[in-house]
Image: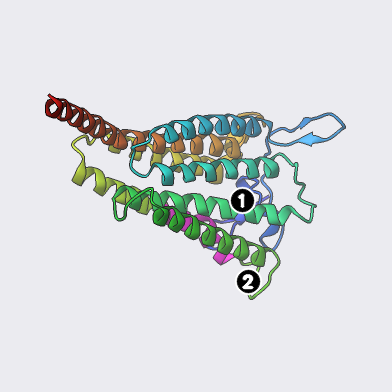
Amino acid sequence: MLTPNLAFGSFDFICSQTALPLCPLVGTSLVTPSCYARNIEVAGGGLLFEPATIFMECIAILMTAVMIYNIRSKYVAVGRKEFVVLFYLYVATLVNEFLLVSGVIPMASGAYKYFVATHIGLIVCAFWSLMFNGFVACQLWEDGTPKSLWLLRGTTFACFFLSFLLSILTFTSSAGLSSSSPIPLFILYLLLPASFLIIYVVTQTILVVNSLDDRWVLGDLAFGALLYAVGLALQFGLSTAVCNAANHYIDGIFFGCVFTLLAVMMVYKFWDSVTREDLEFTVATTGVGETTQLLVNR
């Protein structure tokens, strides 16, 4: 079978490499990869698809729970309340992907397209939240206030609603959109998150260069972006080659999950490194205040 060419506005090439949840819902015909990861039989005669990916997603949820706990523990860190929203969205994305990739929600189900639309909406929202946190870190407005939090919640909800709506209209070929030519969905799913990521990297680079003495933290940022790019390349471009080389035990979806988790961990490490100075400054200020109070009392 000939591999479709990579073309703007078409998912055919990507779907020929990896079985994305949206692939059965777009295109002029069903395009499937020539190599899948092995599935396993479960009790009752059912099949569990992508077992290695499912295991990795469970690990990712546990690791993210640890990061959420650590973020919530840094009470004085800039943007703590806004930053943790990103990780909640990441967990929600993992849970939704678990249901789709494993086959718990079968493709023949009437609810399948709604879960896929939810998946797309959560991905876009996660990248929107990442960009939003980039602006928060630059102190464009006061973090942790009701205004900041409700601005994040409101824009994130709007982002999810519009992404969900565009996805459903595309899948059903309604309101002038077409599943056979899903150009708006292509932009929403691939290009818009990439633009949010680029804006985040640029704002954080400017922040570090202008505000911090320690430039080594830029390595965390660059390494995270590189890991994410490698994950996309393995998932969207080299999945069939990886699957054949691994004798059908894993495919590109597995590596996409692994490298996305590593990228998220680097984003956390970057934020933790940048906000460490906030904690040190607070401790130092508290110490000076206590010393001054003692002198006054004497």
Q: Nearer the viewer, residue 58 or 69?
A: 69
Toward the bottom, the furthest residue is: 176
Q: Nearer the viewer, residue 208 or 247?
A: 208
Does residue 140 belong to the magenta stretch? no
Above or below 232: residue 43: above
Above or below 292: residue 194: below
The amino acid at mark 2 is Leu
Residue 192 lies left or right of residue 285; in this view the side is right
Q: Which mark is residue 51?
A: none
Q: How is the image coloured?
A: rainbow
Per the image, label 1 sits on a secondary structure element best described as helix
> Mark 1 or 2 closer to N-term?
1
What secondary structure is the magenta-colored segment mainly?
A: helix
Residue 134 lies left or right of residue 45; in this view the side is left
Q: Which residue is mark 1?
A: 119
Task: Tally the marks.
Answer: 2
Q: Is residue 107 visible?
A: yes
Residue 297 lies left or right of residue 149; in this view the side is left
Which contiguous range is marked in magenta? 182-196
From the image, state whether disc 1 or disc 2 is nearer to you: 1
Q: Which residue is mark 2?
A: 177
Residue under the point 62% across and 67% down: 181
Toward the right, the furthest residue is: 44
The local crowd at label 1, few if under 14, some if 14 to 19, many if 20 or more residues have their Cα within 10 Å, is many
The amino acid at mark 1 is His
* Residue 230 locus on image (x, y percent): 46, 39
Residue under the point 61% across and 31% down: 58
Does residue 186 belong to the magenta stretch? yes
Above or below 199: residue 48: above
Q: Quadrant of the C terminus?
A: top left
Per the image, label 2 sits on a secondary structure element best described as loop
